[in-house]
Image (cartoon, rainbow, N blue to C red):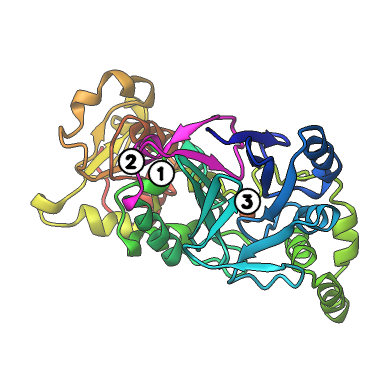
Amino acid sequence: MDPILEQIGPAACRSYLVACPRAREAVVIDALAEDVPATLARLERGGLRLVAAIDTHTHADHLSGGAALAAATGGTYALHEATECATVRDRLRDGQVVEAGDVRLEILHTPGHTPDSASIRCGRLLFTGDFLFLAQDGAGRLDLPGSDAGVHWDSLQRLASLGGESVVLPGHDYEGFGASTLDEERRRNPRFQDLSRVEYVAWQRAIAMQTPDWMLAVIAANLGTAAEHASHHADHGAKSSAAADIAGLSQACPPGGGGACQAGPMGRVPTIFIDEAARRVGRVAADRPFLLDVREPHEFSGPRGRHAPGAVLVPLAQLPHRLDALPDDLSAEILVICKSGGRSARAAEFLIESGRRRVFNIAGGTDAWAGAGLPVER
Ligand SMILES: [Fe+2]
């Protein structure tokens, strides 16, 4: 008998109810504090007993309702054992199985976004939290306290052993992609581009943002250490206290945080900077990447045009009809350049969606190329 599966809350910030229809036992994954009353009502309406509220990781963008749900129902509150959460009751190990009647939920430790990030496998269902999002949303940001891009890359490799038909159920779906499978994500999600660990870490380092203060306050609240966090702020003379930050967090995914757990715009495609692009373009011919310039012809050549030597011009608008201008091999390395990095990012996104496996956007574009004193042709 298939488990009961319901999404609770809005698409941007997803939590899930999974239950056994025979035993009437349930697990809630990534409960939001604001949804606790509605979730309790749903459990009661369905005659469901909560076995466990499990968080896939310590959340930075919303207040967890896990501990409150557990306290109200007699269930347990659980996270992966790497958590520093003071209120957690069960510390889950990699490979451990949580049972709710006939429903079996296997814990897979998939760190990187946070040290305590875990995915949960339930038959064909794969709850990924912020370890993996859908399509261009990529995956959770890797610049939080405790984030580690290399470890995230390791976790992505671990998914290789899972069946491609697994249904990916993420903790956020910022763009409303809906449901997806692991095979679909391997094809279109930029985090599955064919990158080495070193390339992946360099990309994430290049796009790292500073963790907003309100997120640090939310993490502290979810860890049960908000008081310490507040005194830390007081010690450092911060203008806004953690308590004020949390008070302002009236709902999940707060203003400015619509994609709060997501990396910034350059997180949507693998990105390299000019020095690395020049190094790759300078390789011997057999190893040289295909350099694709997606600007307009007058920008590329002529009196006011210029381009990096060896670049092949295919304007962005023509790209969908001119794929024959690219190497036949879908694994061939392609560097995409434009004026400053905007159009090339869109082109790179399109190429990844088209099945290309090794695509890099050049941040800063031809302006940065010329500005660095690298040769140009007209
Ligand atoms: Fe997160």
Residue 84 locus on image (x, y percent): 67, 73
Which labelled disc corresponds to residue 261? Answer: 3
State yes or no: residue 168 in magenta: yes
**Residue beneath disc 1:** 190
| Camera-nearest residue between 85 and 76 | 76
> Which quadrant: the C terminus?
top left
Q: Residue at x 16, y 50 (%)?
A: 288
Q: Nearer the viewer, residue 135 or 33?
A: 33
Q: Is residue 88 left or right of residue 74?
A: left
Q: Amino acid at mark 2?
A: Val
Residue occupying image coordinates x 70% and y 53%? 53
- Pointer 2: what residue? 336
Report crowding for label 3: few under 14, some 14 to 19, many 20 or more residues within 10 A (C-alpha).
Answer: many
The alpha-carbon separation of the residues under discs 2 and 1 comes to 15 Å
Residue 211 visible at all: no
Q: Is residue 9 magenta?
A: no
Q: Which residues are magenta?
A: 161-187
Q: Is mark 3 within 8 Å of ligand 1?
A: yes
